[in-house]
Image (spheres, rainbow, N blue to C red):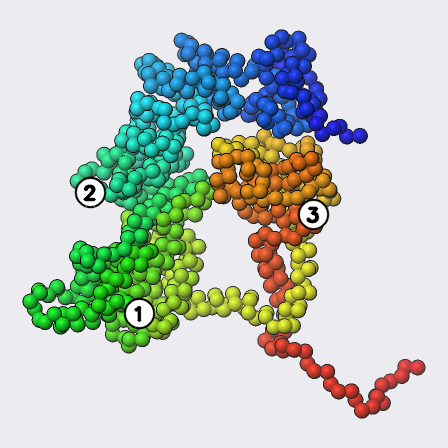
Amino acid sequence: MPPPSDIVKVAIEWPGAFPKLMEIDQKKPLSAIIKEVCEGWSLGNHENFALQNADSTNFYITEKNRNDIKNGSILRLTTSPSQTAAQLHERIQSSSMDAKLEALKDLANSSRDVTFAQEFINLDGISLLTQMVESGTERYQKLQKIMKPCFGDLLSFTLTAFVELMDHGIVSWDTFSVAFIKKIAGYVNKSAMDTAVLQRSLAILESMVLNSQDLYQKVAQEITIGQLIPHLQGTDQDIQTYTIAVINALFLKAPEDKRQFDESSVNILDCPLTEMAHILAQKQLRSIILSNVIRSPKPINDEMAHQLYVLQVLTFNLLEDRMMTKMDPQDQAQRDIIFELRRIAFDVECEPNNSGSIEKRKSMYTRDYKKLGFINHVNPAMDFTQIPPGMLALDNMLYFARHHQDAYIRIVLENSSREDKHECPFGRSSIELTKMLCETLKVGELPSENCHDFHPMFFTHDRSFEEFFCICIQLLNKTWKEMRATSEDFNKVMQVVRDQIMRALTQKPNSLDQLKSRLQNLSYTEILKIRQSERMNQEDFQSRPILELREKIQPEIMELIKQQRLNRLCDGTCFRKISSRRRQDKFWYCRLSPNHKVLHYGDLEESPQGEVSHDLLQEKLPVADIKAVVTGKDCPHMKEKGALKQNKEVLELAFSVLYESDEYLNFIAPDKHEYCVWTDGLNALLGKEMTSDFTKSDMDTLLSMEMKLRLLDLENIQIPEAPPPIPKEPSNYDFVYDCN
């Protein structure tokens, strides 16, 4: 007979004693269990003791997390969190350098546990650490020359403990003094600083900026652009990642009035980081990131890719203001831009007011504005009152006219010499293209937390968006000619151009020249071939006989997909345990038994290299006990953790298995593919329909392939919509042969 579900068999260690095997009743209060353990070793004052996981985390067992204890777990009897916090609080104030160093090392390890952190913070431990950083380290700086390694470790452990304690969100970031900020900024500004100290300092500055608008101002004034550049030029990718994270944080929090300044009046390397939002577009940082990070021989890891993606998004978001600004038809400065476009295109100067009649000048302007392709020939300023793209479209047109003057003049004159119905309207095209590019690059949207989709080519030029536009407007003109389009075909041309751009971007060109080359190969003829090939998979199989065959095959394909999903569940997957603090230190593994009757799962110390055998997974959940599978915001762990609840990416990867007695097993899939595999597999086990996007995609792919194979012998044969008619009966059956 199996033991009751409330009884957990564990081993408990105590220093200097032989470990005990015990059965813990989860219905008992934790204090009663600790008292029982202490009595077994004849230890008094059981209230001064606690149980701890004897793994690498060393987290305390509390009433909140005691249900995480599994059969076979190894626990450790140790001093209570309050006792440990008090002891460490006293030890880190020791006058002995060695004793202080050892205490800070222990504090840095213990601070990851929220239970300990709360007790240490209650003792005003955060203030003690900040005081040590502000003033205490100065005494040891005198010894730095003779004890440099010791000093670096001392400061590193102090800052690590600080970061871990603040990560729990118990203490507000607004409580820190200017002296502390100056000290942390000073570590970042030093050219030769211990790597661990520099990492922690950068992490602290990032958190300060993201969590407090007041601290943003103070931090940004303490660090200059030139002081960050050496960290980007180094070879340590972690330091580079932390540095770009600080830049992104400052960029994200920069107020609108700090996003522009006159860089010609100052040396930008001496500028405070309050000007970061504008400086990022300048050559110094961009070129350093390009040469030292993107084009570094080291492969870019996921965290760096994410920070580069965030930087790309925030840089493009600087365009949002112009994108959402309508043109004021009465603003002479804005109207002068349109005059400039006319002047460059037709090599004309603005006529004085008294030259010729007003009607003649109006007629000339109207004629030229028509050639420039504006919708409103009389007052083209009205074309820029639509938002988006607003004034951003006019900015792009002026940039193209000034920096690619030959191409601009050629496009305008080419189209003005065509018949009216065949001319490609430059003005209208530019406005619609700018709007399309803003949608493609998601200008104005905040960066996603889990995305790594950055494009190296946008880091190769100071005005990458404008250059991107210049390439695409020439592509649009080329495609217009290839399609022999008329004004009625405008929307069709824009759809083809969007297709060309999206297909080129998916190849992640490393430079704008590579983008040009890829777009050159994606001519209208090539797009037609690609579309025709794709259409063959859709339209050529719509006749009734084919549809009937599809319906017959579909259940076989669905059964094949189901078996694949169940096989994947049998292989198992490693999941991360994600807390509200974004910490992802712990792993657990889950897999289905070969007979599809039991889910085996259990915690792991680290991510496995391959499959984990059933023997190593202590917990079991019979499939017969599963009541339902819920996803997203219906999951218990998404309701419990407010921070995770707000994270859209995590929400989309969450699912839970509900079983008897209102118990549940919570999952957060590593990616969308694993999420679909597991939700499909679990639904298949319960006899429910598999509804994920991957099932639909697999069904379409496999069904299309199977149809092609079965119809291979009918290639180039027209399949009739209806079966051939049945002939009339013969006049006699004399031809029938009787075997008897």
Q: Nearer the viewer, mark 3 or mark 2?
A: 3
Mark 1: amino acid: Cys
Across and down, in percent, residue 601 comes to: 65, 36
Q: Which element type, helix, strand or loop, lies under badge 1?
A: loop
Query: Sequence-wise, which precedes: disc 2 or disc 1?
Result: 2
| Quadrant of the frame with the N terminus | top right
Mark 2: amino acid: Asp
Above or below residue 381? Residue 509 is above
Spatial CA span between label 3 and label 2 = 65 Å
Regarding residue 717, the answer to whether it shows in the image is yes
At 49% across and 21% down in the image, what residue appears? 118
Q: Which mark is residue 563?
A: none
Residue 170 quadrant: top left
Residue at the farthest bottom position:
731
Above or below residue 198? Residue 676 is below
Residue 78 horizontal side relative to residue 195, left or right: right
Across and down, in percent, residue 271 comes to: 24, 35
Q: Which mark is residue 686?
A: 3
At 65% across and 40% down in the image, what residue appears? 658
Mark 3: give few (<14), some (14-19) or many (20+) Cα within 10 Å. Answer: some
Residue 395 quadrant: bottom left
| Quadrant of the frame with the C terminus | bottom right
Across and down, in percent, residue 449 comes to: 45, 42
Mark 2: give few (<14), some (14-19) or many (20+) Cα within 10 Å. Answer: few
Mark 3: amino acid: Leu
Which residue position is annotated with label 1?
Answer: 424
Spatial CA span between label 1 and label 3 = 59 Å
Which residue position is annotated with label 2?
Answer: 262
Nearer the observer, 366 or 112: 366
